[in-house]
Each structure stands twice: as structure tokens, then as C-alpha cells.
């Protein structure tokens, strides 16, 4: 299956988690996160039932600096794309979300 054609990578479970949420909880290698983002770039903006994006989950579960930077760049790129595509309220709705605390389980 070609990258970009993967099925299910932006599907969410009952908790609202997509594969990116699930993956970052397990301290993945950067190459795996990169492949997932390339397969479903917009999934970096999906929020789960806790209101967390994959980036927020990565922060919460203390992912590596490299994974955080990759997710930050991908989220910024897709946020910009959404604004460029005319989602005028997108930026204000994202910035009004509460910032999650860094908790450990």
C-alpha cells in the first residue's frame, strides 16, 4: 500500500483516539511517527474525547524531543493549510481550547 493511501490511520475509536494518539503513548521511534504523519497528515489535528491532539498526548506522555518537534511542525503545517483553505474560524477554535497539563500515569 502506498503512503498516502493507508486506510484507517485517521479513524478514531470510542475514546476519540486515532492511531497517532495511540502511538505517542508508547514512546515510538521518530521514523514510525513520520510514516504515520505522511500516511494521514491531517490526523495531527484530530482531538480525542479528552480534547487532546496527538501533539498534546505526546506532551502528556513525555515523547522524545524529536517526536514533539515533528508533531509540532506537522500540526502547524496543517493548521496553516486549513486557514489557507478558508477555515476562518479554525484558528480561533483551536487557540481557545484548554492547554492540557503534563500528567504522568
Image (spheres, rainbow, N blue to C red):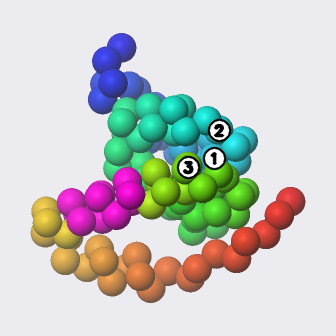
Residue, x 41% and y 82% (percent of image)? 95
Counting every numbered tag in the picture gives 3
Question: Does residue 37 appear in this view?
Answer: yes
- The crowding category of the residue bearing disc 2, from other C-alpha atoms within 10 Å (few below 14, some 14 to 19, many at least 20), is some
The answer to whether the residue labelled 1 contacts the one labelled 3, judged by CB atoms less than 8 Å apart, is yes
- The residue where tag 2 is placed is 28
Which mark, by number, is residue 24? Answer: 1
The residue tagged with tag 2: helix, strand or loop?
loop
For residue 91, side relative to residue 30 (left or right): left
The residue lying toward the viewer, choosing from 71 and 105, is 71
- The residue where tag 3 is placed is 67
- Residue 85 falls within the magenta-colored stretch: no
Disc 1/disc 3 C-alpha distance (Å): 8 Å
- Residue 77 falls within the magenta-colored stretch: yes
Q: Position of residue 23 (x, y in %)?
A: 62, 40
Disc 1 or 3, which lies upstream in sequence? Answer: 1
Residue, x 41% and y 41% (percent of image)? 37
In the rendered view of the protein, which quadrant contains the N terminus? top left
In the rendered view of the protein, which quadrant contains the C terminus? bottom right
Hey, which residue is sitting farthest right in the picture? 105
Quarter location, residue 60: bottom right
Question: Does residue 36 appear in this view?
Answer: no
Q: Position of residue 52 (x, y in %)?
A: 58, 65
Quick check: 25 above or below 87?
above
Disc 2 or 3, which lies upstream in sequence? Answer: 2
Quarter location, residue 13: top right
The answer to whether the residue labelled 2 contacts the one labelled 3, judged by CB atoms less than 8 Å apart, is yes
For residue 46, side relative to residue 104 (left or right): left
Amino acid at each position: 500500500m502506498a503512503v498516502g493511501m493507508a486506510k484507517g490511520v485517521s479513524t478514531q475509536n470510542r475514546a476519540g483516539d486515532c492511531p497517532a494518539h495511540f502511538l505517542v503513548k508508547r514512546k515510538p521511534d521518530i521514523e514510525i511517527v513520520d510514516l504515520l504523519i505522511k500516511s494521514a497528515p491531517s490526523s495531527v489535528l484530530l482531538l480525542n474525547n479528552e480534547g487532546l491532539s496527538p501533539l498534546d498526548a505526546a506532551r502528556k506522555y513525555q515523547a522524545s524531543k524529536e517526536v514533539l518537534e515533528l508533531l509540532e511542525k506537522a500540526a502547524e503545517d496543517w493548521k496553516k493549510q486549513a486557514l489557507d483553505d478558508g477555515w476562518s474560524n479554525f484558528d480561533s477554535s483551536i487557540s481557545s481550547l484548554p492547554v492540557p497539563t503534563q500528567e504522568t500515569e
